[in-house]
Amino acid sequence: MTLADLPVRRDVPAVSAAQMAEADRITIEDVRLPVEVLMESASRQIAAGARAYLGSVAGKRIAAFVGTGNNGGDAVGALRHLANWGAVVHALVVGTRERLRETTNLQIARLLVTTDESRSGRVTNVGSRWSNFEKYVEADLLIDGLLGYNARGAPRDEVAVAIGAAARTSCPILAVDIPSGIDPDTGEAHGVAIGATLTVTLALPKRGLLAQQARPFVGELLVADIGIPHMAFERIGIKTRGLFDEGDLIRVAL
């Protein structure tokens, strides 16, 4: 399946960062769907988005920036699925492993275990050593898993350096949920920001993704069903029933 095969919707509701956080909370605490379950669902959808963009991923080189939050775990999980589909993958951990969330470290462990025999996956703790960036990223696709919808203000330190380095690459970029550096509510670019070729946003688009000023950074916008129940959104006044009737990964007409 390619991007052209995905169903297209214009009437897709959007959420603020605060609304998304509440929907996540309801799902995790009230429905008792653990973060790890949602992350696994998100990971597979991100991988599906990558495959829709690239066509077959067999033999393709796919790298990912891995941030310290849940987006980093989503990106690593996506690499595992892509490796299982024949890609050669490389996780670039930005920052120290000690700062990663437990779920992200678990995803890294799974990637290493599942790709050990085929040697189709590797992990590099890049930290802030970006002087030889080109040797790290020689890929057919780069996945941005640096910052999520909870990030505020301009990217700092090694994240800012990584975003700047991404701007110098020629490979296409897939952003996880929202391009790093873009405000989830306004669409404003705070300092440096990822210029994505496509964005796979999770559950519902964040409002900023639909803002005119975000268009140069978002690229093609896909929205993925990751298992957030309708009732979680209905509790915050947003109707989602019927959104994914034609498929669990859809294109948003911008």
Image (tube, helix red, strand yellow):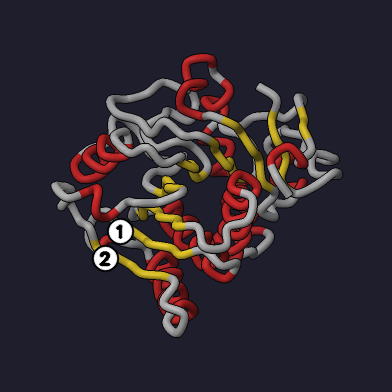
Question: Measuring 45% from the left and 69% from the top, which residue is drawn there?
Answer: 107
Answer with the quarter of the image where residue 84 lies: bottom right
In depth, the one of 36 and 194 nearer the eye is 194
Q: Amino acid at mark 1?
A: Val
**Vertical placement of residue 31 versus 119, above or below:** above
Spot occupied by residue 156 in the image (x, y as percentages of width and height): 22, 38
Question: Measuring 57% from the left and 66% from the top, which residue is drawn there?
Answer: 81
Q: Residues within 10 Å of mark 2 (few under 14, many from 20)?
A: some
Extreme residue in the top direction: 212
Spot occupied by residue 221 in the image (x, y as percentages of width and height): 61, 33
**Vertical placement of residue 15 versus 74, above or below:** above
Spot occupied by residue 199 in the image (x, y as percentages of width and height): 54, 38
Spot occupied by residue 25 in the image (x, y as percentages of width and height): 57, 51
Image quadrant holding the C terminus, namely top right
User: Is residue 203 among the parts visible in the rendering?
Assistant: yes
In depth, the one of 239 and 104 nearer the eye is 104
Question: Measuring 80% from the left and 47% from the top, which residue is drawn there?
Answer: 247
Extreme residue in the front direction: 59
Q: Amino acid at mark 2?
A: Arg
Residue identified by numbered label 1: 93
Q: Residues within 10 Å of mark 1 (few under 14, many from 20)?
A: many
Residue identified by numbered label 2: 97
Horizontal side of residue 147 vs 74, given as left or right = left
Secondary structure under the numbered disc 2 in the rendered image: helix
In depth, the one of 151 and 126 nearer the eye is 126
User: Are the two marked residues, 1 and 2, in contact with CB atoms closer than 8 angstroms?
Assistant: yes
How far apart marks 1 and 2 lie (CA) works out to 7 Å
